[in-house]
Image: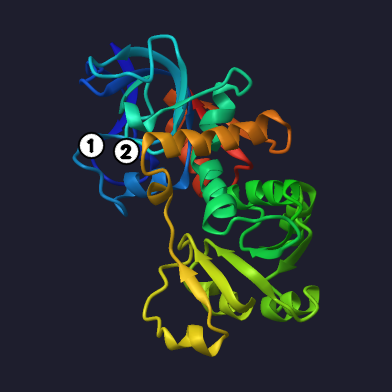
Amino acid sequence: MAKRIQFRAHGGPEVLEYVDYQPAEPGPQQVRVSNKAIGLNFIDTYFRSGLYAPPALPSGLGAEGAGVVEAVGSAVTRFKVGDRVAYGSGPLGAYSDVHVLPEANLVRLPDAISFEQAAGVMLKGLTVQYLLRQTYELQGGETVLFHAAAGGVGSLACQWAKALGVKLIGTVSSPEKAAIAKALGAWETIDYSHEDVARRVLELTGGKKCPVVYDGVGKDTWLTSLDCLAPRGLMVSFGNASGAVDGVNLGILSAKGSLYVTRPTLASYANNAENLQRMADDLFGMIASGKLKIEIGQRFALVDAAKAHIELSARRTTGSTVLLP
């Protein structure tokens, strides 16, 4: 028998149970992974609380982890028992000793990357990969705006942008977060709690504004982001931390300079096994070279997942948090 975290009803961290369970045998195109480290993400609290609906209850939790292949299905061709692997897109159930996943959801994990690093970076790191290298392929020399620059995704974007020779202006909510973003590689920061973001972007760019704005905040920053874009600039709305952007009149894009807008998701970029592995190789290469440093700020035993959720929701965590089976 193995152990896992599950929940039978929606609610607070107290609904999480540490239970015995019998792992399934992998189907023809599935792989069973012995987890060595499991990633903790804010979206996990949404499934637990009921904001997002899991397929059925009782349900496992978590979609990100890294470990060693324990068993493979009859039609699996890319992996064998003993391979080091990582995953970042589910299915739910990563909070467990072992997890069964589709072969297409797994990537090879090079020896240079630890299990903890992989579990702490897959989801956020692949997001930064597609944002900076695909949605708008930064060449170096650009000045760009990235909201929430000291957050999980933003902290990686600051480092990656600097490595590319890009001047990243990061928005933050406090002097402490400004210091974090600057230390990670942000060129400049804007504290939106008391500074006019659009006016500061105009000043910092000498009136040119930015060719691209990366906005994971959503509703609260939508108009500000548009005001920071140069004519024919690209608005990349990749998240909705403050609520979804809705009721948009497309005429506003014309009025503000023939702007472009996209609402990308990781699933649309990592849409097959080959693209997923290519993106992961780019990410792992940045980590192995030292250009991208992954901070594991907290480690919790799997049995203490509820405690980890309490700390995460109270904003008392820094960097990445991992659960250890």
250 in relation to 91, above or below = below
Contact between marks 2 and 1 (CB within 8 A): the answer is yes
Viewer can see residue 107: yes
**Number of residues whose C-alpha sits closer than 10 Å to that of mark 1, classed few (under 14), some (14–19) or many (20 or more):** some
- For the point 66% across and 36% down, the residue is 286
Q: In the image, which disc is placed on residue 125? A: none
* Residue 147 placement (x, y as % from top left): 61, 63
92 in relation to 302, above or below = below
- Res 5 → quadrant: top left
Q: In the image, which disc is placed on residue 8? A: 1
The three-letter code of the residue at mark 1 reads Arg
* Residue 118 placement (x, y as % from top left): 54, 29
Q: In the image, which disc is placed on residue 15? A: 2
**Number of residues whose C-alpha sits closer than 10 Å to that of mark 2, classed few (under 14), some (14–19) or many (20 or more):** some
- Of the two numbered discs 2 and 1 on the same chain, state the one appearing first in sequence: 1
- Of residues 221 and 18, the one nearer the viewer is 221
The three-letter code of the residue at mark 2 reads Val
- For the point 38% across and 12% down, the residue is 80
Viewer can see residue 62: no
Callout 1: SS = loop
- For the point 51% across and 48% down, the residue is 127
113 in relation to 172, above or below = above
| Left or right side of 29 for 273 | right
